Image (cartoon, helix red, strand yellow):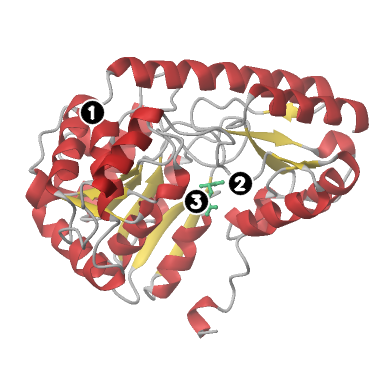
Amino acid sequence: VAKRLEKFKTTIFTQMSMLAVKHGAINLGQGFPNFDGPDFVKEAAIKAINAGKNQYARGYGVPELNSAVAERFLKDSGLQVDPDKEVTVTSGCTEAIAATILGLINPGDEVILFAPFYDSYEATLSMAGADVKAITLRPPDFAVPLEELKSAVSKNTRAIMINTPHNPTGKMFTREELEFIADLCKENDVLLFADEVYDKLAFEADHISMASIPGMYERTVTLNSLGKTFSLTGWKIGWAIAPPHLTWGVRQAHSFLTFATCTPMQSAAASALRAPESYFEELRRDYGAKKALLVDGLEAAGFVVYPSSGTYFVMADHTPFGFGDDVEFCEYLIREVGVVAIPPSVFYLNPEDGKNLVRFTFCKDDDTLRAAVDRMKAKL
Ligand code: GLN
């Protein structure tokens, strides 16, 4: 394997999902729903295939999807963007992240992440030859340590990357935090990459897009996808929204990574994004109920559960059970309890920072969540 990827192992999601199958354990690890996406979206895909929409798509997205993304972004963030010049469709948000990093970051540029971070950020930054700095968000509220962040910005800092709502903690960046980060970006001429794939799973307050903070649109790439919002994680449809000068970099990388994204699924994605607002309200309500079911169950089983205000994840402290670290705890949980969770220490530059924590997902049907909770109450 190339040196730039030497330090990375099989992703924790793949590892844990394989163990779930091997041990017949209930999988509350990797974040994918065990229920299907909506019929109207699946039918739109079948229609598109039967209508012969099966050859290469326009490289940066089929026009109807670029337009649907722009319409949705206007509704969600109040920003009017040009669907042809400022929206790039990619094969999932993970590709949008890669195209953004490879298209805009030079070797030696410094990029600041917030730990715990989604694992692809660090690996892709490593592929780009970037220097990664991480600011750790700590329980119970995972607030941004503002002064620490400020002193981390240097003349080499090219970008700050945020994820709100935040995987794996469920934290949502507050307006004050976003404004503080925005001021740092403006003062130091730093770009901002905002991964907002969980924006429709915001339970307590409305999601705020960094691009909507005054003066930020021109230096922000907003990253999003279809998978979480429509329970279609296997479709791998994502997009990047950015002003034309940044879109150029993203598109150049995308052109040579995948060139274009699956054509019929893009057509169906356009129908999905045009769903009535009631679809999004119902999604949020359903997930709110699932969150309550899991959180109550974890607390009853003896965990200290940290508040999650967005995403379909919740972080808990496993130390009441007396294990050495998160990996040891998760191994026991699989083998002896029959439940899979994610040990989050891989999401930190310093794994010690995550060793007391464990991440559970609640994107599962209620019976599955209840069965997992029952096992943990009985066997932990
Ligand atoms: N985003 C999902 C999670 O955090 C899964 C991602 C993946 O499997 N690569 O669980």
* Residue 232, x across and y down, in percent: 44, 40
Relative side of 249 to 321, left or right: left
Q: Which of marks 1 and 2 is in front?
A: 1
> Which of the marked residues, 3 or 2, is nearer the chain's N terminus?
2
Inspect this view and state whether residue 216 appears: no
Label 1 element class: loop
Relative side of 21 to 257, left or right: right
The response on whether ligand 1 sits within 8 Å of label 3 is: no
Q: Residue at x 39, y 51 (%)?
A: 236
Q: Which residue is drawn at 15% across and 59% down?
A: 58
Please name the amino acid that badge 2 sits on: Gln
**Callout 1 environment at 10 Å: few (<14), some (14 to 19), or many (20+)?**
some
Q: Which residue is drawn at 23% across and 38% down?
A: 270
Q: In this view, does 346 lie above or below 207?
A: below
* Residue 304, x across and y down, in percent: 75, 28
Label 3 element class: strand
**Callout 3 environment at 10 Å: few (<14), some (14 to 19), or many (20+)?**
some
Q: For the N terminus, give its image quadrant.
A: bottom right
User: Looking at this view, is 50 or 310 the one in front?
Assistant: 50
Relative side of 140 to 234, left or right: right
Q: Where does label 1 land, which residue?
A: 274
